[in-house]
Image (cartoon, grey):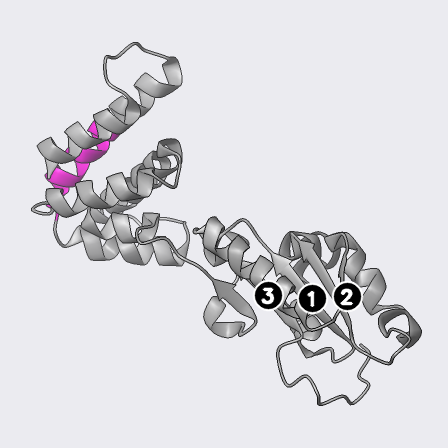
Amino acid sequence: MHNLGWNVYNISMLHIFCGDDTASSRAAYISKRAQLTQSGREVIPIEASAVADIVQSTGADVVNLFGEMSVYETTGLVSACKKIYGRKAKQQLRDLHADQAMLLLDWEDKSAYDLGIDKDKFSFLKEYKLPHSTFTLLPTLIPGHKNACLKALRSLSAHQPIEVTFAMILRHVRLITQLAAGLTPKDNPFLIRLARISLSHFTPQQALKLYERLLSIDINVKTGRKTPLSLQAQLEVLIMMAL
């Protein structure tokens, strides 16, 4: 890593903009780029896969003729780092953050969760969330909360394909039924924790019945079985009946 000892930029050398609210994250990314451009800096577009080459190049390659820090913009940096560095990808991101020879802006069209990054451990990650996400919907999927669940589902459906939401609901309820049966499911620890919290609101019979109804909807979708209701409508009817 190049470290020229500059202190004039007492800021993060790496800015990753991401989140379920892709419109807001993209706008913030563009705004940061415009801010740098308006200050007279040239922002150079590069492919994410080329970042490694820039980091490993000589100092003359990353510093312009006026001795100023070079500024780059890219997209999909996290995936590129994972592909190139494997298990060392997160450390590479930390190194980029600490590199005083270049400033790098990156936009990701995913959430921190989907990127596999804990935003609390990476200060250079700026996440923009929707008012409702899958993870705010799932805790409402419990008996006695049908109105809250419907509200969260409808809000989320305006930003996320219903197929994605349905898959997460099915996965969530499957975990609940496994826990209710005394099994130890193998899944994401965070999702298991959410399911364990929801489990206290269900009897084993309620959880199993909800899961069976979701499986029925899943079969309808995958087999192309004709139904007068859309997937969204089927989910809403199920919520009204089961919760």
Q: Is residue 181 above or below residue 57?
A: above
Give how far apart the Cα atoms at labels 2 and 1 are. Answer: 6 Å
The residue identified by callout 2 is: 42
Q: Is residue 191 left or right of residue 86?
A: left
Q: Is residue 160 above or below residue 124?
A: above
Residue 17 position, x and y percent, is 55, 60
The residue identified by callout 3 is: 32
Q: Amino acid at mark 1?
A: Thr
Q: Residues within 10 Å of mark 2 (few under 14, many from 20)?
A: some
Residue 164 position, x and y percent, is 39, 36
The answer to whether residue 19 shows anywhere in this view is no
Q: Is residue 28 above or below residue 5?
A: above
Q: Earlier in the sequence, mark 2 or mark 3?
A: 3
Q: Earlier in the sequence, mark 2 or mark 1?
A: 1
Magenta-colored span: 202-214
Q: Which mark is residue 37?
A: 1
